Each structure stands twice: as C-alpha cells, then as structure tokens.
C-alpha cells in the first residue's frame, strides 16, 4: 500500500490535485506517517472551476495551501464513520459539514463519488467538486480572487 501522494499519483483522476499539492509545498507533509482524511477533488472537479481560477491559485501558493488544507481532516475517517460525523474541523481551520442524504454521504452538500481509498497514512474520499471555505468569498468580493462560484 502507498502513501496518500503515491496513491493519488497512481490514480489518473487526481493529476491536477497532485500538481496543486506540489505547488503549495504540501507534498512532503502528505507523504509523512500521519493519519488523515483527504476529500480529493478529481481532475473533472478542477475543470469545473471558472476560467482563471486555478491559475490564480497556482500563482498564489499561500492561497492554494489554504484551499487544499480545507480538504483535509486530521484524523482517519472511513465512510462508515462519516455517517455519524456531522461536521469536522479541517487542517485549514474551517468546518466541513458532513451528512447523509438518501444513504449518500455529502460533504458541504456535494457527493463523495468514491469512498475509502486506502493509503498507508490515511484515507482518501474522491469528490466531484473543489470545496472552498466561506471566507474566500470576502477575497472574491474585494477583487483579490477571480470571480468564482463558491462552494462551501
């Protein structure tokens, strides 16, 4: 079994995420023997972002780090544990809302498209959306971030 980064790299659906992780200097941290949960946006999720959004984040590593760490919970949570999770603090510091709807697990209202992808240092849940913390809307309103449809 591989660590989180190798698992993402070996799965062709997460190349954009791996590029972003590397650009935000989070690569080494996600290879260490931690026990984390990563809600991993697929390449398709990143492609849904409005034009210029990903370029903004790639050109601003501190903002990219905040965005990416909003997808990480500092404990290992299997899908079966998410059914009772309600909300959890992210490494970034904001809360993720987790609930079920007709038996489907939702994170901030969006689907987990594949749960329980195991890695030596945590668990990955593939998601079809890039999640963003609420405070980023303030940056967008001030013009410091391109106009994006916030998802939180």
Image (cartoon, helix red, strand yellow):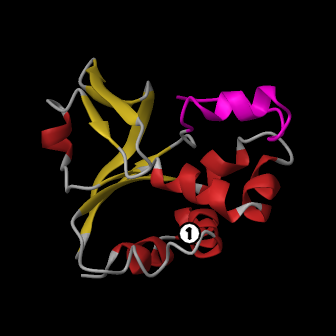
Q: Locate residue 10 relative to residue 60 in the image: left or right.
A: left
- Picture coordinates of residue 64 (x, y %)? 64, 57
**The quarter of the displayed image where residue 43 is located:** bottom right
Q: Which residues are magenta?
A: 132-152
The residue that appears at 61% across and 46% down in the rendered structure is 45
**The quarter of the displayed image where residue 5 is located:** bottom left
Give the overall secondary structure of the magenta segment.
Answer: loop
Frontmost residue, 136 versus 55: 136
- Picture coordinates of residue 17 (x, y %)? 57, 63
Q: Which residue is situated farthest in the top direction here?
A: 102
* Image height of 85 relative to 18, above or below: above
The residue that appears at 28% across and 37% down in the rendered structure is 88
Frontmost residue, 41 versus 97: 97
The residue that appears at 64% across and 71% down in the rendered structure is 19
- Picture coordinates of residue 62 (x, y %)? 64, 60
Asked if residue 144 lies in the magenta stretch, the reply is yes
The residue labelled by disc 1 is 21
* Image height of 31 relative to 136, above or below: below
């Amino acid at each position: 079994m591989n660590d989180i980064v190798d698992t993402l790299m070996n799965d062709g659906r997460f190349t954009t995420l791996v590029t972003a992780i590397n650009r935000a200097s989070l690569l080494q941290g996600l290879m260490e023997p931690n026990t984390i949960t990563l809600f991993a946006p697929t390449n398709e999720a990143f492609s849904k972002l409005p034009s210029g959004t990903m370029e903004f984040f790639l050109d601003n590593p501190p903002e990219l780090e905040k965005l990416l760490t909003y997808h990480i919970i500092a404990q290992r949570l299997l899908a079966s544990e998410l059914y009772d999770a309600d909300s959890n603090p992210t490494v970034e510091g904001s809360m993720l809302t987790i609930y079920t709807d007709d038996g489907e697990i939702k994170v901030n209202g969006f689907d987990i498209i594949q749960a329980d992808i195991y890695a030596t240092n945590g668990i990955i849940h593939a998601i079809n959306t890039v999640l963003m913390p609420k405070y980023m809307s303030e940056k967008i309103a001030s013009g410091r971030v391109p106009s994006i449809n916030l998802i939180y």
